[in-house]
Amino acid sequence: MNATIATVVAFSGSLALMGGYAVRVAMALRAERRRAATPSRPEEPKGDGSCTREVKPMGRVRAL
Amino acid sequence: MDRDHHWGAKAYWGLTLALLAAGTVLVIGAPVHPQVGTVQKLLYIHLPVAANTLVFAFVVFVASVAFLGGRRGSWDSLAQAAAEVTLLNGTVLLVTGMVWAKVAWGHWWMWSPRLCISLILWVMYGVYLVVRSRVSGGQRRATVGSIYGVVAFLNVPLLYLSVKLLPNDIHPVTAGFQAGTYGTLLVWFAGVTFFSAGVMAASYSLSRMVAQRTEREGGGTIGMKGATA
């Protein structure tokens, strides 16, 4: 086994593994932050003008 | 406040990358070991990841004990994040050690007590994360994980004591660095430690955000104190 090649591969492989994991965590965190920042679905208005409950998605509107 | 945090994180990761880049340049320029040769340079990363494996295993232990004491979800998230970093450092530790062993000893692996304890440590923290992913329910998962995290830590003093108790083990006790190369080793220690702490912090934030969302959506962390803390 060539010692220099083995050293370079192990060194760069280790850094790639560490960097890859950090990027994976960073991307997941970014996605979660975006998800948290997305405004929630509109609420159903009550008679007095206030909103208390989320409107559930109803699916496609059927033509009568 | 959020803007300050954003710039703080950027500065932190900039410093970490600068340390790792400087460490790489210093390793390239470091003298070749007269007996072992070029492969000895792997120890510049092997030693810091070994130390960080033990340090973050200790963080898992402390966070697990704290969770069992107070049932706060934030401790459980910290334990999980630290376990991920322990496993990551442990993986690099084993890979660099095996390549070094192949060149220096002619074997990828030797079944010596110290190497076996290191392998068991790595397996235990891998199993910790698998167990967590298989147990359903936030409270139950955190309790099982914390008990496991405490038990898994028993390996760490064993590994540390093996240096004293097994002086004839094939694994070298000293790294044999030449004079004038300690600065390079110090840069690597700083770079790897900054990196590990940064990844743990990011993983912790992610875990907290997921826990808060799960609680909002009505599942997972029911009955756990401070799930949204």
Image (cartoon, rainbow, N blue to C red):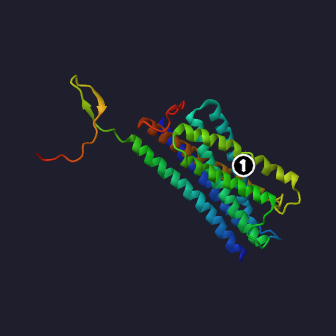
Residue at coordinates 18% horizontally, 46% vertically from top-left?
A: A61
Q: Is residue A12 above or below residue B149?
A: below
Q: Residue A53: which quarter of the image?
A: top left
Residue lying at the far left of the rendered structure: A64
Q: Position of residue B190 (x, y in %)?
A: 68, 50
Q: Residues within 10 Å of mark 1 (few under 14, many from 20)?
A: many
The residue positioned 21% from the left and 24% from the top of the image is A47
Which residue sits at x=63%, y=52%? B127
Side (left or right) of B207 relative to A53: right
Helix, strand or loop at label 1? It is: helix
Quarter occupied by residue A39: top left
- Chain letter belonging to callout 1: B
Report which residue position mark 1 lands on: B54
Q: Kindly tell me whether residue A29 is visible in this rendering.
A: yes
Q: Quadrant of the N terminus of chain A?
A: bottom right
For residue B168, side relative to residue A19 (left or right): right
| Residue B105 in the image, given as x and y percentages of width and height | 80, 71
Residue at the image point whose x is 44% and y is 39% from the top: B213
Relative to the observer, which residue lies in front, B103 or B26?
B103
Residue B33, by quadrant, is bottom right
Quarter of the picture containing the C terminus of chain A is: top left
Give B104 or B66, whichever is nearer the viewer: B66
Please say if B174 is above or below B11.
Answer: below
Residue A27 drawn at (x, y percent)? 48, 52
Q: Amino acid at mark 1?
A: Leu
Establish if A60 lies above or below B138: below
